[in-house]
Amino acid sequence: MSSLGHFQILVFLHALLIFSAESRKTHLVNDNDVESSDKSAKGTRWAVLVAGSNDYSNYRHQADICHAYQILRKGGLKDENIIVFMYDDIAFSSENPRPGVIINKPDGEDVYKGVPKDYTEETVNVENFYNVLLGNESGVTGGSGKVVKSGPNDNIFIYYADHGAPGLLAMPTGDEVLAKDFHKVLEKMHKRKSYNKMVIYVEACESGSMFEGILKKNLNIYAVTAANSKENSFGTYCPESYTPSAPEFETCLGDVFSISWLEDSDLHDMSKETLKQQYHVVKRRVGSDVEQTSHVCRFGTEEMLNDYLASYIGRNPENENFTFTESISSPISNSGLVNPRDIPLLYLQRKIQKAPMGSPESKEAQKKLFDEMNHRKQIDQSIIEILRLSVKQSNVLNLLTSTRTTGQPLVDDWDCFKTLVNSFKNHCGATVNYGLKYTGALANICNMGLDVKQTVSAIEQASNQENRRNRRYETNIKDRLISGELSDGSRPARDQNDVPRGHLAVYVGREERQRFVIPTKYLQYPEFRTLMDEVADEFGYDHEGGIHIPCEESVFEEILVRYMSCDKKK
């Protein structure tokens, strides 16, 4: 055979190889198959998406999850292989300015459309989550009943967006997802050969504590977290940073880590981008090298880093001509980041500012805000008292802030940790929105080897002391209001020289005006700023006499009682 003939055969074989590779790629997308990089065995891609919160102020978690669903569907995964947990109280909430629509960024498209709500409301709980992963149909309660029916050749993608705290992730109902319990489920799945490989993305504060020192490297599981074990993650696309296209939203639309991997996946060809490449893109976008941001972390099987994302989340054919580049994503500005534990407060403050003075909406938002602020101060005081009673010493600040060496798990005795967390929740009303940020301190108690029963007793004692103190303070303040110590009737002409230093007199009421003497520092608080705006609207900034506040006396007294209660506990 001539050299030309040999060359033609080589060209033909090369073309045949290219065609074969492209055929496999098309088959991967269209049939939800995944090709294993190590065994050349084909399986199915499964996905479990969890938004572990409820309430409209947590809009961003369900928005993140819905966005992820759209990426998976465009990537070729079938609905029968995608299981969605979401409370589903956002899209049709009376507070949603676009009923039936959820967006994940300003001017973004609707990501809610078509999302299968397999588990909603009370069925979004830890028992159903574990049973879904284990493929235990008889163990799930309510919902669609859909579970992961995977086998040894299948890949699984888990994405969890929610509040977190050291050692746990939140659920809207029931118990939290504790790190050790979650890993028992993963190890059981590995032992049963329920999967080939698994990728887990977690958006939550202190999310690194779910895997650090716990996730074994031989399970074929690769996990990426929004933050390390001791820091917050952050919300973004919040009202202060909106473009003019979304001014009507009063809360954050997304989370920094989540929108970083989601928007990267929207753009790139996932059959050409590896897990390692996306990790670096997300880390750069989150700004891990910039102060006051979280540090994206990875754990588990390092050998999976060179796997292509298409093996887990699919590949959108529309992006097949997009060339991957890591430099496309620059860090999000710090000014656009919001501490997620502050988001509920900011949300209520904005509602108060926008609602008409004295309206039911304003009163309700004010009550919720003050209750939350008051509760947080109670929690702060309670945890200090719990630590003092537990270790029998007064200086306990180091127990609040100290953490274990990098690479170690949060705690060794997880049963002790679980007992103290449940006691702290039940007796002090700690929730993952705020109070459970102190679970690291409870872990420190366990690591010191202190008696668990004695610590539970200390939690009960601290809770009882705080409750008695609260009742005493509120009764005292109300008595002072009734006796006239804080108000002295309708005497607007009274001499201003009797006002103590650092205070001012204000006259409250629309017709019969009552005189109150309040600390000037109250004027910086959002409710008083709103009142001052009302004063400016009615009387202008330049008027004679004292400050006249045109609101109902009962409304003002409620505000005053709550702020003074908070002051007394400092």
Image: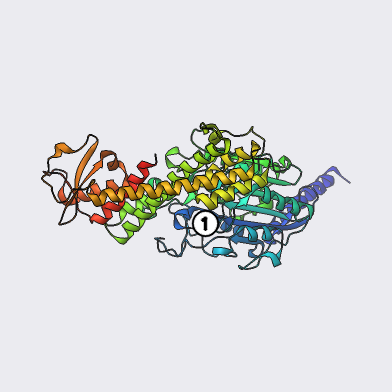
Q: Nearer the viewer, residue 465 or 427?
A: 465
Q: How is the image coloured?
A: rainbow
Residue 235: in sight, yes or no? yes
In this rendering, position of residue 351 left or right of residue 444: left
Label 1's element?
A: helix
Q: Name the residue: 35% across, 49% down.
A: 474
Quarter-wise, where is residue 412 in the image? top right
Measured as percent of width and height from the top left, residue 350 is found at 35, 51
Q: In the rendered structure, which amino acid carries the disc numbered 1?
A: Gln
In this rendering, position of residue 340 left or right of residue 471: right
Q: Name the residue: 55% across, 65% down.
A: 114
Residue underneath mark 1: 62
On the rendered image, what quadrant is the C terminus found in? top left
Q: Is residue 483 above or below residue 117?
A: above
Q: Residue furthest right?
A: 1
Q: Nearer the viewer, residue 240 or 437?
A: 437
Disc 1 crowd, CA 10 A, few/some/many (<14, 14-19, 20+)? many
Q: Nearer the viewer, residue 505 or 48?
A: 505
